[in-house]
Amino acid sequence: MSRPIVLGAVIVFGALSMTAKALQQPAPSAAAIEVDKLADNLFVLKALAGGGGGNTSVLVTATGVVVVDTKNPGWGRPLLDKIKTITDKPVTMIINTHTHGDHVSGNVEFPAAIDVVAHENTKANMEAMRPASFVAQPAGGPPPNIFTRNNGTGMAKRTFKDSMTIGAGADRIELHYFGRAHTNGDAMVFFPAARAFHMADVFANKGMPGMDSNNGGTGVGYAATLTKAADFADKVNVQTIINGHNAATTTRADLREFIQYVGDFVKTAQDGKRSGKSVDDVVQAWKTPAKYAGYEPTSPAVRVKANVELIYKETN
């Protein structure tokens, strides 16, 4: 068999495998969304097993429901249906923590009149919807911009630069930006009454973070941004951290450990560059240090490589 034929067979097989996997994935439904109650008016809605994307926080206020992140395409309607099992109040606001499609795509299925709030850099990123640098892209390229495809429905309407306060008392929400990390527009959402802090994908889970160079993220500066967030969490006595893709919430101690993990990874990459190693050398050698119990033992190679490439570019 000639090389072109072999290559064609591999492409066809890969496409068929992707199609089969897609067919096996259940259609989005409210039944796939699990609800964790953190306080009388604060809930976390997860669809990790159903492929829904990032975790969603829901705050039920006196005047309506505030939703933080809206998951993957097709999950907006299931989210709305699930929220109806919690309260009969209408959704009045969406807060998007960052631009990635598994956190913002559900926006387009919410009523167009809903207020949508994000960091100013995230709004610019949503207008472009560039693919994340640390995720392997499908053979046909990234999907079309979901907001353009829906005539701007779901796009951020209000933005902030450093901080923003919404509501008061039990309904108070604080939005904070501590600098570049996962992207250049990572909003972190603090619910003072519950002492809960939605950090989304800046601290997605106990594993390799995504450092998205396509959307302004950083590798070298990541731990410093996390440290600012951790210092804030200590100051306001955060009791619960809501992560972007974790099945359970975490603590301030977990956050401090994660900062060390990120710092160790960045130092490994920087040491590799300074000693003349190639990016691939560092990627192949990287293993999660044994001291990080409960962390993923290995990380997706495409993510590690994208992160190391970014750290190399940022390191003299």
Image: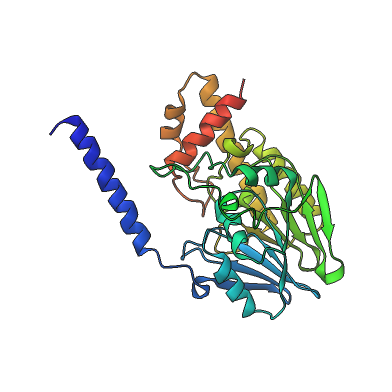
The residue positioned 59% from the left and 49% from the top of the image is 148
Q: Nearer the viewer, residue 307 or 249?
A: 307
Say whether residue 215 is left or right of residue 118: left
- Residue 133, relative to residue 54: is it above or below? above
Q: In which quarter of the image is the C terminus?
A: top right
Say whether residue 109 is left or right of residue 186: left
Residue 203 in sight in this render: yes
The residue positioned 28% from the left and 42% from the top of the image is 11
The residue positioned 64% from the left and 59% from the top of the image is 69
Q: Quadrant of the N terminus?
A: top left
- Residue 83 is situated, as x and y percent measured from the top left of the image, at 63, 74
The residue positioned farthest toward the left in the image shown: 1
Say whether residue 74 is left or right of residue 222: left
Residue 185 in sight in this render: no
The residue positioned farthest toward the right in the image shown: 168
The residue positioned 82% from the left and 50% from the top of the image is 163
Give the quarter of the image for residue 178: top right
- Residue 37 is situated, as x and y percent measured from the top left of the image, at 65, 74
- Residue 81, relative to residue 181: is it above or below? below
Q: Which of 265 and 244 is in front in this view?
A: 244
- Residue 213 is situated, as x and y percent measured from the top left of the image, at 58, 35
